[in-house]
Image (cartoon, rainbow, N blue to C red):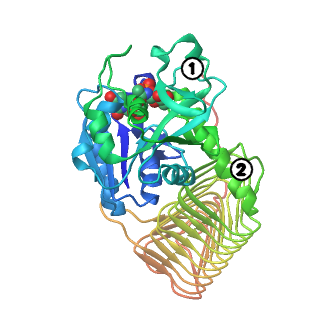
Amino acid sequence: MNVVILAAGMGKRMQSALPKVLHPLAGKPLLQHVIDTASSLKPSKLCVIYGHGGAAVPEMVSRLAESTGIAIDTALQEPQLGTGHAVMQAVPQIDESAPTLVLYGDVPLTTAASLRRLVEAAGSDKLAILTVEQANPFGLGRIVRENGQIVRIVEEKDASEAERAIREINSGIMVIPTRRLKAWLESLSNNNAQGEYYLTDIVAKAVAEGVPVVSAQPAAEWEVAGVNSKVQLAELERRHQLNIATALLEQGVTLMDPARIDVRGELVCGRDVVIDVGCVFEGRVELADGVKVGPHCVLVDVRIGAGAQIKPFCHLEDAVVGDKSQIGPYARLRPGTELGEDVHVGNFVEIKNSQVAAHSKANHLAYVGDATVGSRVNIGAGTITCNYDGANKFRTVIEDDAFIGSDSQLVAPVTVGKGATLGAGTTLTKDAPAGKLTISRPKQLSIEGWKRPVKVKK
Ligand code: UD1
Ligand code: CA
């Protein structure tokens, strides 16, 4: 099968410099949703027609082709003279012996299952159209039937009053016998209200030549909803998020409110996971059995171990959290953070590019960067690893059972030995030996007879 994706339109109503099909839905460009669905059907040819937006669309397509290994062709349509004219640009690239599926780059949520049904309905020699009954069909092409058989499609602007009353609309998605398609495209005229070469005109041509025209329907109306404005984009985003939320609920995930979750990537959950309101998941996020995520957390490319708890208002990116750990509230785990089992990271603690082993704690106000922290370590409030001298970064090593007193600065590269204790306020510039107390602050003293200054009267 060939797949041709039409994506040359300009999307004026988006009011944006970004080409319409590159606007993200659930964190992924509209066009990429369509390409992903199309490639799940394993087409022999996949061709994207682009026009508006300069090189941005073909650049995105070639990046995608490179990262997925899927062969995707592009063809430029310039100027844009209608949907029929758009498909014409793909003709030199498509394989005559297989049918052609036409998709729109701005219709992101069609399911592979619905497309498979359409492809099956078309077989090798029929024209199949994905149609839907709409309460408000305004602006769309209407399916004209006689004795139940499709005879043609008429566009809103060319339709009579009786035709405008038809509720069955053309989604634009069709499967067409390719050899016939080529001939029909060559014979299209633009003698219509918009002066465009309509792809939809091939339907009447098929009927005239005795080629059977059939239809299939998607499981839901949103599958054929297109994006022409930010309003429609926002509506479809909510629809898509609700679908994702429903799938999570069906798997047994507890969502405190399925209308208040955003998944912009892949969220994989174990059993008995609970997610509170306002959380955003990006990239690939794995939550193991029994994980609880509190309200308003952002998790990007992270793995959370079984029974761990992420308390409210945390930001985690490219990090691994061990089983039964407790993070937050207000914690930040930056890329390269790996926490072992039962690690506690409290409020206003930032950890970057560091490993922290089992049962260690940093409960309040700390920065741990480029550090290797052992087990059962206690990092006191206000502790900072000074990992950066303005030019280079250095590592801090804190061995098992060490105790770092509050408000200490560990000037890397430096090592705190096993079981060592740092007194509060230590500025550590040399290694602290294992098992000993190290303090760098001056001895406390009190001045006898000292008096507070008094204000001089003028
Ligand atoms: C088209 C159909 C209409 C259908 C509607 C569904 C035609 C003539 N009409 O309407 O029956 O109900 O879609 O949304 O086919 N495009 C190009 N090049 C062009 C023109 C369009 O690539 O020259 C692309 C657009 O980027 C878009 C798609 O084709 O992805 C549909 O174009 P659009 O203008 O939105 O649809 P209509 O022609 O109004
Ligand atoms: Ca449209």
Where is residue 244 drawn, in percent x and y? 64, 51
Where is residue 241 drawn, in percent x and y? 63, 45
From what the image shows, is residue 42 above or below residue 50? below
Label 1 CB sits under 8 Å from any ligand 1 atom? no
Mark nearest the camera among 2 and 1 is 1
Where is residue 343 drawn, in percent x and y? 66, 73
Mark linked to residue 138: 1
Which residue is drawn at the image coordinates 68% and 71% (left, top)? 325
| Residue 228 visible in this rendered orientation of the protein | no
Image position of 311 (left or right of 427): right
Q: CA distance from mark 2 to mark 1?
A: 41 Å
Label 2 CB sits under 8 Å from any ligand 1 atom? no
Mark linked to residue 295: 2
Asked if the residue under mark 1 is in contact with the one under mark 2, i.e. CB atoms within 8 Å, the reply is no
Instruction: Tell me the element at label 1.
Output: loop
Q: Amino acid at mark 1?
A: Phe
Instruction: Tell me the element at label 2.
Output: loop
Location of residue 225 by image quarter: top right
